[in-house]
Amino acid sequence: MKESRQTFLNLFFILWLLLLLKTASSSPLPHGKDPRAPSLPFGLYKGHTCVGCVLVVSVIEQLAQWHNSTVKAAVERLCDYIPEKLQGFCYVLAELYGPHIAELIDREMNADVVCHSLRLCKQDPGQPLCHLYSPPKVGLSVAIRKAKRIMKTSKDLKSFMGFSSVCTFPLLANLCEKIKYVLRNKVPFEDFDGDKFSTFPTLRGYHWRGRDCNDKNTTVYPGRRPDNWDAKGDSNCNGIWGVDPKDGIPYEEKFCKGADSRGVVLLGDSAGAHFHIPPEWMTVTQMSAKSFSNLPMAFSDEFDWPQFSEITGFLNSTIGGWTDSLYLRLRKRNRCNHRDLQNISQNGGSSGNLLSLIKSLARNQLLDNPAIVIYATIGNDVCNGERDTLAHMTTPKEMLSNVVQALQYLDSRLPNGSHVILTGLVDGRFLWDNLHDRYHPLGQLNKDVTYSQLYSFLDCLQVSPCSGWLTPNETLRNLTSERALQLSNVLKEIARSEKFANFDIFYMDFPLRQTAEEWRKMGGESWQLIEPVDGFHPSQIAAALGTGITWQKALHEWPQVLGKENPFNDQIEAIFKDQGGH
Ligand SMILES: *[C@@H]1O[C@H](CO)[C@@H](O)[C@H](O)[C@H]1NC(C)=O
Ligand SMILES: *[C@@H]1O[C@H](CO)[C@@H](O)[C@H](O)[C@H]1NC(C)=O
Ligand SMILES: *[C@@H]1O[C@H](CO)[C@@H](O)[C@H](O)[C@H]1NC(C)=O
Ligand SMILES: *[C@@H]1O[C@H](CO)[C@@H](O)[C@H](O)[C@H]1NC(C)=O
Ligand SMILES: *[C@@H]1O[C@H](CO)[C@@H](O)[C@H](O)[C@H]1NC(C)=O
Ligand SMILES: *[C@@H]1O[C@H](CO)[C@@H](O)[C@H](O)[C@H]1NC(C)=O
Ligand SMILES: *[C@@H]1O[C@H](CO)[C@@H](O)[C@H](O)[C@H]1NC(C)=O
């Protein structure tokens, strides 16, 4: 019985833990200096467990406060909001552990104290006690000791076990399989699907690449040049096939021959994959069942929302802002490009670990159309959660070597006539400057958690997505930006001097300044360009605005990258409608 209790506890926390794991994993272990396959940062679970616990307890506390209810009722309310599949264990948990947590909260212990007394937050020897909230008047350690005395009955709450016991749970089973596979074979997360294109949306299915239109036939996939002008079937999944009965000419030949068709591929990081945690999950004043309806999907997409992203987005955003993407614009310019997209980005992607991720690129040099590859690792080469963060940043020399290797690999895979655009690193001082004294979603009800507090909490636990920028130390922020600028200059120099057989190559700065200017002109404020929950990633609005800026630059300076406008677009639309959708 004890064992199953433990399992339920784990399940509960693993939900939040995975969530937080992702918050921070834009940079943890897999960073610039490590050229091996990125693996999940298991060693960091301790810190993430603490963050997850503080988050859950805070939400419960605030729900009780907002609805003027008991803590027990608040836990039940939270369980009620969570999707049905997950509710069972939530109720069991509430039954088993609700009273313990409730007792502590009723005695005005804050979430930090509760989580330390549950031992889900731990103090490392010689390190400070990490906390999100201002310490209670009696002091944090005194409060924790007091709470532990109250909690003495709860031995079984003590430890946090490994993954295996939770993998029997249906929703998590897939994810567990995937994680085990990745760990066993040391491959990038991306390689999980044997056939790289898929008809399944999440778990790196078609939210991440153009949807396959025939999963059974491996010679059918988006981006290939059509087989026999697709007279009999849609071999490239662009929705254009068959023969015009009026003249016997295949439609694909009529509309797409010489149309300069091309796909778009993103090689990037969590910003590229569009990392997002919905603020509704922790804003109690607006919380309802609707707030959590996207929870299962978010889990299986690793908290990325590539389907709305800047480069490869194709669905209307359901997470605020709007969708605009290089892919959508290329498709509008030439409808033969329908579905030809690949998002090879992952949380934590940097110039180093991209070298293994890049192997999941699906492009056949002989059979496929050329591609536009956007190389955008905008921060992880300088972002890590280490205490001596500067020492762990990628050096210009390493950057040069990593990027040239990646480009050589691309040269061996991309069809002739492709294009590569290198995007510079962002200047992350924008984050601190615009957020540090604002309230985090978790701190809005009681005006008690600012981003500055959140950053310090994550930094203390060594799970900060970027110790160099998310810090009150201005000297350190400046040094981090200095390194980022040096690395951008390496990219610029590569674009200027290196030549490749199968693609030409360009450089552009990350368009943060123009994005902010444009948004201000539209009446917006700078802080809205940053993800509210993690205080680190670009928001949906920033992504959509960035697309327009990149597009305009390409159109004016490198029009050959975008190809011609297809004069048959209207006819294609008239005959093939939405071309099979996405
Ligand atoms: C909260 O609920 C209690 C008991 O139902 C009631 O006595 C109290 O007045 C309520 N407080 C507020 C602020 O509504
Ligand atoms: C697979 O697709 C190719 C190209 O459209 C076609 O020539 C071939 O006959 C298909 N194979 C099967 C088994 O359907
Ligand atoms: C791809 O990268 C873009 C980069 O902006 C990102 O927004 C998007 O979410 C990523 N994933 C997919 C599948 O498009
Ligand atoms: C997105 O929204 C626009 C109008 O708001 C609509 O015309 C379009 O069909 C929508 N696209 C998708 C994929 O739902
Ligand atoms: C690639 O195409 C260009 C013309 O577009 C041609 O000059 C060049 O020789 C080709 N390169 C290779 C490796 O075939
Ligand atoms: C950081 O850089 C800014 C802008 O370059 C400069 O104004 C400021 O004085 C620098 N601060 C420190 C502490 O180096
Ligand atoms: C700020 O960061 C710099 C560079 O890491 C360090 O030398 C300095 O001691 C830090 N200042 C404070 C007040 O921590």
Image (cartoon, rainbow, N blue to C red):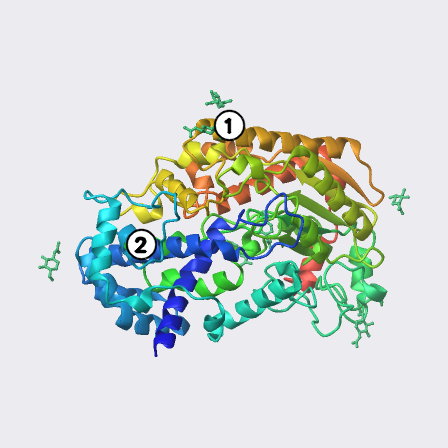
Q: Where residue 300 sits: x, y (%)? A: 52, 64
SS of the residue under disc 2: helix
Specify the farthest residue to the front.
Answer: 125
Q: Foreground: 337 or 186?
A: 186
Q: Where residue 167 sits: x, y (%)? A: 49, 72
Find the distance from the CA under tag 1 to the CA under tag 2. Answer: 34 Å
SS of the residue under disc 1: helix
Name the residue at 62% across, 60% down. 189
Disc 2 marks a residue whose amino acid type is His
Q: Are marks 1 and 2 in contact (CB under 8 Å)?
A: no
- Residue 478, numbered label: 1
User: Which residue is labeled 2 in the image?
Assistant: 116
Mark 2, other Cα within 10 Å: few <14 / some 14–19 / many ≥20: many
For residue 298, say whether it is visible. yes
Q: Where residue 458 sits: x, y (%)? A: 41, 45
- State yes or no: Cβ of the residue under disc 1 lies below 8 Å from any atom of ligand 6: yes
Mark 1 or mark 2: whose residue is earlier in sequence: 2
Image height check: is 579 above or below 308?
Answer: below
Name the residue at 80% across, 68% down. 243
Q: Foreground: 334 or 487?
A: 487
Left or right of residue 118: residue 168: right
Quadrant assignment for ligand 7: top left
Q: Quadrant of residue 221?
A: bottom right
Disc 1 marks a residue whose amino acid type is Asn
Name the residue at 70% across, 40% down. 421
